[in-house]
Image (tube, grey):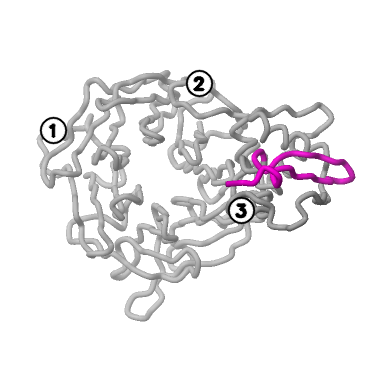
Amino acid sequence: MMGIQKDEVKFNVGGKFFETTATTLAIAGRNSYFGAMFDDNWNLQSQSYHEEHFIDRNPDCFAVLLDLLRTGELYIPANIPERLLYKEAQFYGLLDHVRSAKWGQFDGNRLRLSRSITGRAPGDGTAIRAGPDGGCCVAHGSMVHVYDWMLEEHPPLNLDYQRVNDVGWIDPENIVISTCERLGRGDGGMGLFSSATGDLRYKFQVSHENQVKSYTAGALSFSSDYKIFSSCKGRSNEYGIGVWDQVTGKQIDFFYEPPGWSLGDADKLQWLHGTNCLLVATLFPRKDNCYISLLDFREKRMVWSWCDIGSPTVDDEKRVRDAIAMEESSSICVVNEYEDLGFMDLRRTVGGVRWSSRSRLMKGNMPDEPCYPKLALHEGQLFSSMNDSISVFCGPDWVLTSRLRQSYGGSICDFFDWWGSPFCAS
């Protein structure tokens, strides 16, 4: 336990003096600036417990951040620019605290528009991914636009006429981009880029029989043990799912597709942390038929699969447009382009889709250029876009509980949730 006589802490920040307690500073968390000043019991590591700790930073911002730790509320005086406060919060490791206080706890049943930026709505080719620092990136065509959490844009990433297939964040400073190979040039594949400058830092290679192969990289996913997964389609035998180490950038594995399947054309990859398996989905209209499978890389085999070939329930209204695995309920949710959600039981090796009449999407206004629906899952709530609306489903039967409609933005192209902050492009 923390000693009472050691709880008081004094700071001299830019010439102004502050007094607080280790108890208050502990709210900042172990990974903050203040966490480094204390031992595991939040006792000061220095033996001079009553000395003033000098920090050469802005004192006015420090006062705001200290009050945030004390009260949990954020008040920014008119004389302090918000961008300056955010930079100071980043220095102290308090940016998550600032965002939580500013936006509040995320609740899918109380969706609201927080902030927006204007621009051209590209359509179904758009991929949007929320970043770990609260920002996002939007990919379309050969361009990737990167924004910080205040939606101010960084220098865009120009892929020189290579079409971007998917994009994902390694960390706040690095983005992985998958692109198509341009015929005869061999300059497609996958690269690691700086999110701040747009500079290419590394190209991920595919090797087969000790030869480096050109390939098209498709859908991306990332595991908790620092692996990158990508669907790959090449000119030779390199069709399937490639695996790379995030730290070294080296290829460490490859799962070649079985006959009749389309792993290399996959539109969606999702790493399942609880089962250490990878969801791979090839969706309509990329292929005439939908293929969904779970791959176990430890045993190098497909442990679950589903395909709509020959299914009597499949017609034009039941073509699967997106899929997402829900580990807690051991199921996969799929959505078609109309208004239906369907569910498949991962505990059964055979069986089809159970289309739910109680889980209906709110269609919203039909835009001039409709986009296919997308799915996302956050803390037990299921989200699905449909035209200009996002619908929320909860409970064991996934009943519709709320929706957000912003018809002035047009059709929703894509949306993604990370760190409790949903983003959508329309």
- Dot 2 amino acid type: Gln
**Residue 116 percent across, percent down from the top left:** 60, 29
Residue 301 percent across, percent down from the top left: 21, 61
Label 1 crowd (10 A; few <14 / some 14-19 / many >=20): few
Q: Secondary structure at mark 1?
A: loop
Residue at image location 84% in from the left, 46% down from the top: 12
Left or right, 395 with respect to 104, comes to left
Decide which of 86, 250 is in the foreground and name it: 86
Looking at the image, which residue is at 82% across and 43% down? 58
Q: Is 64 located above or below residue 229 in the figure?
A: above
Give the mark, 2 or 1, whose residue is nearer the N terminus: 1
Disc nearest the viewer among 1 and 3: 3
- SS at mark 2? loop
Q: CA distance from mark 2 to mark 1?
A: 33 Å
Residue 148 picture quarter: top right
Q: In the image, residue 384 lies at what x, y percent? A: 37, 30
Q: Which residue is mark 1?
A: 313
Residue appearing at x 48%, y 68% in the figure = 249
Q: Calculate the distance from the C-alpha at mark 1 to the C-alpha at mark 3.
A: 45 Å
Q: Which mark is residue 117?
A: none
Instruction: Give the labeled residue for mark 3.
Output: 195
- Badge 2 crowding class, 10 Å Cα cut-off, few under 14, some 14 to 19, many 20 or more, is some
Tags 2 and 3 touching, CB below 8 Å: no
Spot the residue most to the right: 15
Label 2, on which residue?
Answer: 406
Q: Which residues are magenta?
A: 1-24
| Left or right of 86 on screen, residue 379 | left
Give the mark nearer the N terminus: 2 vs 3: 3
Determine whether, in the image, residue 361 is placed left or right of residue 314. right
